[in-house]
Image (cartoon, rainbow, N blue to C red):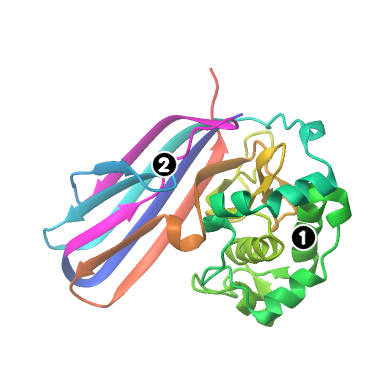
Amino acid sequence: MKLDICHVTRYRYDASVTDSVNEIRLTPRTDERQACYQHRLVIEPNVQLLSYEDYFGNRVHSFTANDPHRELVITSHSTVVTRDRDVIWKAAWGSEESWNRLRSADFIDGNAEYLLPTSYASFHPSVIHFASGIGGEDDGVFGFIRNAATAIYEEFEYKPHSTGVHTTADELIGIGTGVCQDFAHLLLSVCRIRGVPARYVSGYHFVGDLQGRDAEFEQASHAWAEVYIPGVGWQGIDPTNNNLIDWRYVKLGHGRDYTDIVPVKGIYRGTAGQTLQVTVDVRLAETG
């Protein structure tokens, strides 16, 4: 399915600022499930963009706006073709074989960055207790992952603005409500505690209907997780909606947690007063 995405980030400052140094991770990846046909960035004020790949293979653009300005607007336009991945589930290893593989020393060493806790995906006692109550290991790694995502989906309420960008997995457990970033971090924690490599994914989720009409509520960036299943490889799963990743999802990038793939981050010289407005529009592309 072909999707058009427009992501606008607008900063307004109380007074003129200078030397605004920024990194942007807003370029959709191309992989076995999606292809980025077009991506265009427009920055106001006009700046020179530099581009490189980070450690995780994500496309990064950086720029510096030196001249005084009261507003910074970053507009990302993308056209991405997605499809449902043809996962050969019969290739998944059996339960005992797959868990033994995950627990082998060479596998742990090779995937350590996606097995260790982070400040967001913590191994807090409350998270360990939550993880200990999730079953399904007898059904293999995939069965356990589905149980973990379902447990998060059923246990916690999705409630916009109930948490912030710095909320951790253990704080979600204490609050009981959160957003997609929180649910993804908790799934990362659960997987890693149980020895399953898991990485954080940022992107978009198309929520309009199949006739091309937009959703009746404000869209936003989305977050989910990718987990490693022996015999299958990395598989995306969305605990916020209790879904496996399909054509409605567009991936921007992945990392150990949110801090590795913040869509827009930067610093500047000047006033501390600022407002941020982010708008996202994901729709079916017109054909013709």
Viewport quadrant of the N terminus: top right
Q: Nearer the viewer, residue 234 or 73?
A: 234
Mark 2: amino acid:
Thr
* SS for dot 1: helix
CB within 8 Å, label 2 to label 1:
no
Query: Which residues lie in the magenta part?
Result: 19-44
Q: Please, what is the dominant secondary structure of the magenta stretch? A: strand
Q: Is residue 287 covered in magenta? A: no
Give me the C-alpha separation between circle 2 and circle 1. Answer: 30 Å
- Expressed as whole percent of the image width and height from the top left, the position of residue 196 reads 68, 55
Q: Which residue is mark 1?
A: 148
Q: Nearer the viewer, residue 128 or 50?
A: 128
Q: Nearer the viewer, mark 2 or mark 1?
A: 1
Task: Sort mark 2 into few (<14), some (14-19) or many (20+) by Cα contacts within 10 Å.
Answer: many
Count the numbered circles shown: 2
Residue 88 in the figure: left or right of residue 208: right
Q: Which residue is mark 2?
A: 27
- Expressed as whole percent of the image width and height from the top left, the position of residue 106 reads 60, 49
Q: Earlier in the sequence, mark 2 or mark 1?
A: 2
* Residue at the spot 44% in from the left edge and 47% down from the top edge: 56
Q: Is residue 27 covered in magenta? A: yes
Residue found farthest to the top: 288
Mark 1: amino acid:
Ala
Q: Is residue 240 visible?
A: yes
* Residue at the spot 83% in from the left edge and 48% down from the top edge: 96
- Expressed as whole percent of the image width and height from the top left, the position of residue 37 reads 45, 27
Task: Sort mark 1 into few (<14), some (14-19) or many (20+) by Cα contacts within 10 Å.
Answer: many
Residue 203 lies, with reference to residue 155, above or below; the image says above
